[in-house]
Each structure stands twice: as structure tokens, then as C-alpha cells.
Image (cartoon, helix red, strand yellow):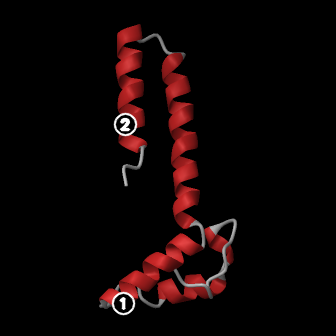
Amino acid sequence: MLSHWPRLDTPRTDPRAAEYLRARIGTRISDEDLSTMRAVITDVGAVEHVDRDIAARTERAVGTLRASTATAPAKDRLAAMAISATQRTS
């Protein structure tokens, strides 16, 4: 990881990281550029931010499903599918 990219609470608050990434969008990048871009995205907390958002939305969806008039087996299967589709495996 790149220690010069500060760890932040939200990915939107580091103008240097944003500038670095914007400068490379739509361009040919090397393996090294890709590795650096991945590190920037991770280091600014973007992955964790998105994972938290997905978890919150999944929880809300499953809650709505549980309150629906669907049959219990349908609720169970759909909830399992929602969780399976939104959990990171690696």
C-alpha cells in the first residue's frame, strides 16, 4: 500500500487521490499504474464505504421482504439469494 495516501473516513475527501484517479481514467495504464490505482481506492476507504452501503441496502431489502405478504419459503429463499449475491467472497 502507498503510505503517502492518507487513510480517510470517506473516499470523497482526498483531492490528491481524486486528481490522481481522474488523470488516468480513459487512458492506457501500466500494471504499475493499475496497482497504484487499486491502492489509492483501497487506502482512501472506498472499498469499505461501498461494502457498508451494500450491507445497509441489503439489510433494508431483506427487512422489507420479511414484512411482505410473500410466503415464508419464498421470503427465506429470496433473503438467502440477496445475501448470497451481495457478500464479498474474496
Residue 32 has which mark? 1
Q: Position of residue 50 (x, y in %)?
A: 53, 56
44 versus 68 height, above or below: below
- Distance between the alpha carbons at the discs numbered 1 and 2: 33 Å
Task: Count every numbered label the image shows and give the total.
Answer: 2
- The residue that appears at 56% across and 88% down in the rendered structure is 19
Residue 74 has which mark? none
- The residue that appears at 58% across and 58% down in the rendered structure is 49
Which quadrant holds residue 38? bottom left
Q: Position of residue 59 (x, y in %)?
A: 55, 34
Q: Position of residue 29 (x, y in %)?
A: 32, 90
Residue type, numbered disc 2 = Ser
Task: Determine if residue 44 is in view.
Answer: yes
Q: Going by the image, does 36 lie left or right of 19? A: left
Q: Going by the image, does 85 lie left or right of 13? A: left
Task: Determine if residue 71 is in view.
Answer: no
35 versus 43 height, above or below: below
Q: Secondary structure at mark 1?
A: helix
6 versus 65 height, above or below: below
Q: Nearer the viewer, residue 4 or 67?
A: 4
Residue type, numbered disc 1 = Glu
Instruction: Point out the tag, 1 or 2, that comes first from the N-terminus.
Output: 1
Q: Position of residue 18 (x, y in %)?
A: 57, 82
- The residue that appears at 59% across and 67% down in the rendered structure is 45
Q: Quadrant of the C terminus?
A: bottom left
Q: Secondary structure at mark 2?
A: helix
Q: Nearer the viewer, residue 29 or 6?
A: 6
Residue that label 2 marks: 84
Which quadrant holds residue 13? bottom right
- The residue that appears at 36% across and 90% down in the rendered structure is 32
